[in-house]
Image: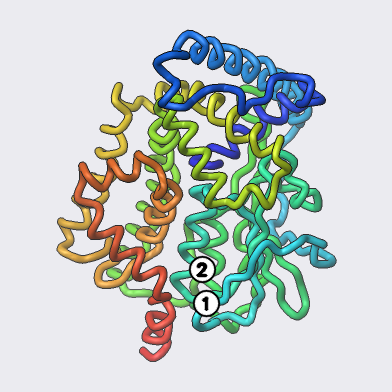
Amino acid sequence: TSIHSLMKTEMILNGLRRTFRNPFNHPKPSSITFSSQKQSLAAPKYKKAIVAVGTSVILGGAYGYYLVKKSSLIGHAEIYSAKGILRELPPTKITKSINNVETVSPVRLILYQYQTCPFCCKVRAFLDYYGLNYDVVEVDPVLRTELKWSNWRKVPIVLGVTPHAVQQMNDSSMIVSALKTHLNNPNQDFVDIASGYPIIEYVNEDGKKMSEVMNRYFLMNHGDFPKHVMEAYEEERKWRRWADEVLVHVLSPNVYRSPMESLETFKWFSEVGEWEKVFPTWERQLVVYVGAAAMYFISKRLKKRHNLYADVRNSLYKECNHWISNIKKKGTTFMGGKTPDLGDLAVYGVLNAIEGCQAFKDLLMHTDIEPWYHSMKLAVSNHEGVSRLKDLKAM
């Protein structure tokens, strides 16, 4: 996660932790010189440092991958209920509480996240747009001790606390769909809604254990709807999938495009995620410097995997221009029309994850996405979904 950053570096960093048990017996990651003022004088050392860190990343990551791979094999496919009802609320320290203008749900929500994960940003965009109050638990991306109670080890996770149950919800798209269903049908049992999104586990052709949340783009609404409403739901699902399956994949190669850009990205992650409050100093330095080096190399592989242009900025511009051109064809402010729909919120959330990066600044300069993005930012920060829900209920 992290612009796939943190999710994709977890395994590598854990491999490094296993390989280098005591970080103080080795050169500190912060000793690598990325400073632009010293770059010209220290170019040979700089290159050697990158190679050294890259070699460490490869060795540690390979070992971590071996351990993960070894433990992930299962012999059969298994389908189980996604109800995920917990016997009690996990004893987790709340990082912060988001108190929006108005609560339109009696369910207490707890979001487990990485601040700059695009999938977590999607969920936050939804929660803020609809004015929902929620607590945040910032997860340590290396140790993940905040998730030791959960079999699902990816973020985001949302716990919905009701008077009679603690409901765990996994996968950003499932979370959004389940919560939107709840807002549309507030009298429907929250646990029953979550049961409409079962998880299937299976082993792929490579022997890797996979899991998928079924129905994650569908709202569990009841009753018959006019044709135009069904068509709108279908288009909304199309763009939500596009955000997950296309747009998100152009982010990593862009924000980790060069060693310097990768380092600046991780420094921004550290700042906006308040990592100084989460990590001890040595561990934060490990995540920032080794993570930046690791993701620089990994981004090259991702660029090839997703068939991006030689200049990856052009791939970012292409996808965002594709999004904006389709809105312009409709002649509306948002893809959802006069107001944002779940497709708008998904795309906004993904892009919001890189707002502090150079790639985002370049995106605003070279595409026409800024008016839409600015309108979305206002709609989300002003909780405009609250009045939208009231209007729908009054109809």
In the picture, the disc for residue 100 is 1
* Mark 1 neighbour class, 10 Å CA radius: few under 14, some 14 to 19, many 20 or more: some
Q: Is residue 172 left or right of residue 13?
A: left
- Badge 2 amino acid: Leu
Q: Is residue 134 above or below residue 346?
A: below
Looking at the image, is mark 1 or mark 2 earlier in the sequence?
A: 1
Q: Residue at x 52, y 22 (%)?
A: 33
Q: Residue at x 28, y 61 (%)?
A: 335
Q: Is residue 224 visible?
A: no
Q: Is residue 192 above or below residue 348?
A: below
Q: Select label 1 or label 2 by which is in front.
A: 1
Q: Are marks 1 and 2 in contact (CB under 8 Å)?
A: yes
Q: Which SS class for mark 2?
A: helix
**Residue 141, horizontal then vertical, whole percent:** 66, 42
Find disc 2 in the rendering and name its residue.
127
Q: Residue at x 47, y 21 (%)?
A: 301
Q: Quadrant of residue 210?
A: top right
Q: Is residue 147 above or below residue 250?
A: below
For the residue pair 334 and 136, the one nearer the viewer reads as: 136
Query: Could you tell me which quadrant the C terminus lies in?
Result: bottom left
- Badge 1 amino acid: Asn
